[in-house]
Amino acid sequence: MRTIEEQGHIFEEWITPAQIAAEIQPVADRINEDYKTKSPLFVVVLNGAFIFAADLVRRFNGRCKITFVRVKSYEGMTSTGEIRFIVPLQQNIEGRDIIVVEDIVDTGLTIHHLKQYLLDQGAASVRVAALLCKPDKLQFADAEPDYVVRRITNEFVIGYGLDLEGFTRNLDAIYKIKEQS
Ligand code: 5GP
């Protein structure tokens, strides 16, 4: 099993690249089915969702557009309790069917605010596709993702787009913390 050290913590490989690919496919199948008569706009939440989004949208068979927002709710390994828009939405979304692509839903704060923002901007519908979700930490009922690749317990994970202080996004697998030093 592969391990890496980052910021004084040891992380071990947990979900392999092959497992990630296999588990994304059924989620993509459901999205293809649900949106077969629609042309959705994928709103990718930067930075963490960029790798998941690249894999997910390439499995979408229909017409679609893709755009990006950048929000931040975490400092280090702790949620700050509020979100900041660092890169706001760049286009008119009035009447669009939106699929928000998120790396991980933790407290749900990010999705709760983002969904409300997208609906306020005139979106016709907003659904959420998340790579990971920590159901035990969810604090906002409306932030439960419509599509989830894997539900996990309350561990801090990195890799496959997910960072620790900006590092580790390039890891091809998802790693979880092993021990703290
Ligand atoms: P929420 O707003 O749902 O509390 O947190 C969502 C954001 O927190 C995610 O998009 C991600 O940036 C960050 N986050 C939450 N849990 C983790 C985790 O286990 N690992 C990493 N790297 N980021 C996390």
Image: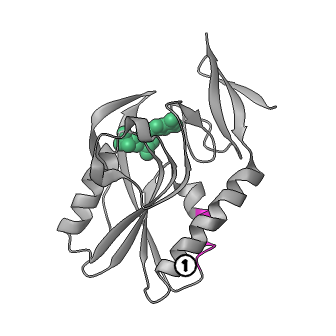
Whether residue 86 is visible, yes or no, is no
| Magenta span contains residue 145 | no
Seen in the picture, residue 39 relative to 174 is either above or below; the reply is below
Seen in the picture, residue 117 relative to 151 is either above or below; the reply is below
At 48% from the left edge and 81% from the top edge, which residue is drawn?
64
Magenta residue span? 54-60
Name the quarter showing ligand 1: top left
Residue type of the residue flagged with mark 1: Asn
Q: Position of residue 178 (x, y in %)?
A: 66, 21
Image color mode: one colour
At 74% from the left edge and 45% from the top edge, which residue is drawn?
16
At 53% from the left edge and 80% from the top edge, which residue is drawn?
33
Secondary element at tag 1: helix
The quadrant holding residue 75 is top left
Q: Position of residue 10 (x, y in %)?
A: 67, 21
The quarter of the image holding the C terminus is top right
The quadrant holding residue 164 is top right
Q: Position of residue 111 (x, y in %)?
A: 33, 52
At 55% from the left edge and 38% from the top edge, which residue is drawn?
163
Judging by the rendered image, the residue that carries numbered circle 1 is 32
> Residue at the bottom extreme?
37
Q: Label 1 crowding class (10 Å Cα cut-off): few <14, some 14-19, many 20+?
A: some
In this rendered view, identify the residue nearer to me: 173 or 71.
173
